[in-house]
Image: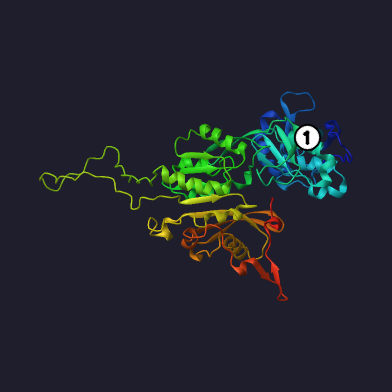
Amino acid sequence: MIPPPAIQRGLLTLDRSLFKTSVSAMALRIPASMTMECKKTLGTDMLLEPKIRNVIDSDDGEKSKRLVLLNLDIQTEDLEGASEKTREFIKEKGIDLTKAEISVGYDHWTADEILRAILPEEIIDEAPSSFTTVGHIAHMNLKDEYLPFKGLIGQVILDKNPNLKTVVNKTDSIDTTFRFFKMEVLAGEDNMIAEVKESGCRFKFDFSQVYWNSRLHTEHDRLVKMFKPTDAVCDVMAGVGPFAMPASKKGCMVYANDLNPTSYKSMLENKGLNKIKDNLLIYNLDGREFIRKAVEDLEKSGYQTPVAVPTVPKGKKGAAAPKPETSAAPAPVAPVTPTAPAHKFKTFDHFVMNLPATAIEFLDAFRGLFKGREEQIPEPKVQLPMIHCHCFSKSDKPEDDVRERVEAVMGGKLELDSVKLHWVRKVAPNKDMYCISFRLPAEIAFASDVKRKLESETDTSITAGGAPEPAESAEKRPKTE
């Protein structure tokens, strides 16, 4: 192995020339015509280092000869460390041995290797070489101890990743209103307009003004796969549209909303980029207001679930049409008319609430949402929407924790047979992100009191000593990732 780069502790400005060095390797001087045979025979006894050629021009100036470099464990002419096969081949062919000098520099080593050679010894165990890619942007989250070296770290990351043009560092927690991180440019262009492809869609947005997390693409795909092309979907906290755009392209009728005006503008632009037509409506409202507004607007539009057109399997190309069993004239076929919808009133099949820090708090908007619609929704366990609400939990029993918090806000019990808690990802050592999916219970949907009703046992919890303890306030709940 090529040894690690020379230690250069204390650098604050990157000097790439400090990493130039050379190593000595044993080499076989062979006729050029023998190159392929030699490589096949030597196998792992050859030098197999990334970015370094193991066959080079001969050092004696003869164009018809080549030097084949051996791995660095073989350093003597008696070929100690080489396989018996290699030794016999060299002896049988009468191949000359020589020494060759290999020049290596800054470009040879990885970002992690360079940073370990530069940063103070007490902080190199977790050298910050990892990042999240958002288009041309590398997004880092540096710990405080690395901040004195942030410019140097950013430049190394930029150098080692040719597809990147900008390296940024998060400087604050997520904005709880508009869901974006404050950040600073560490290296490269000051260009925050990112373009990303995900789930068959294009997204363009100002990364410094909106929320985007590339680690959530699996979660985006998971939910969209649940939706049928004939479903109506309400995306309450849509961001720039990672759920809304692919759902619309799938055929769903989608109403999407975000309070952040920059996210709203990005969704409008992304709708055009993805050539989405009339099945995506975009809003810029508060989440609670939007939930009621979207339900009203969907009803006013007269939208009904499209009738699925059955697909007829095609026969093999060139196959003859089946012959009738008799020569009698076929019976007349009655004209087919579309089946009228079973119920005139139509609401959303799914609500998506992807604001994990606070989404649960918005669930009170569903209390009494369909009051007065009881006759139009005679089958609530089928016709009432599924709700997919993202959240955080630090509990050892997240199923109970999340469900109880949801029930407290909605002022009623969930129907357990419809509840599913899906683990999304870990965001901190003792903090996980989840998505709770459940059918909106009739008790809550048709409640006469629109204002949420909390039962006494949800207001307090009992400590081990038996004394009541106030329930965790909204202010104490986790607000950021």
Q: Quadrant of residue 317?
A: top left
Residue 346 vertical placement versus 65 (above, below): below
Residue 479 drawn above or below residue 180: below
Q: Relative to residue 415, is residue 18 drawn left or right? A: right
Mark 1, residue position: 155
Residue furthest right in the image: 10
Residue 9 spot, x, y in % from top left:
89, 41
Please say whether residue 382 is visible from this viewpoint.
yes
Query: Viewer-proximal residue, 424 or 467?
Result: 467
Q: Is residue 317 left or right of residue 85?
A: left
Q: In this view of the protein, can residue 28 be seen by the observer?
A: no
Scheme of colours in the image = rainbow
Q: In which quarter of the image is the N terminus?
A: top right
Q: Which residue is drawn at 76% across and 40% down?
A: 111
Viewer-closest of 403 and 162: 403
SS for dot 1: helix
Give coordinates of residue 302: x percent, y percent.
Answer: 39, 44
Query: What amino acid is labelled 1 in the image?
Result: Gln
State the residue in front, 90 or 276: 276
Left or right: residue 66 compared with residue 379: right
Query: Label 1: how many residues lie within 10 Å, few (<14), some (14-19) or many (20+)?
Result: some
Task: Write down the quadrant of residue 202 in the picture.
Answer: top right
State the residue lying farthest toward the left: 328
Give the x, y percent position of residue 57: 75, 27
Residue 268 picture location, percent across and down: 54, 34
Identity of the residue drawn at 28% across and 45% down? 338
Number of labels in the image equals 1
Q: Which residue is drawn at 73% across and 36% down?
A: 167
Front-most of residues 235 and 153: 235
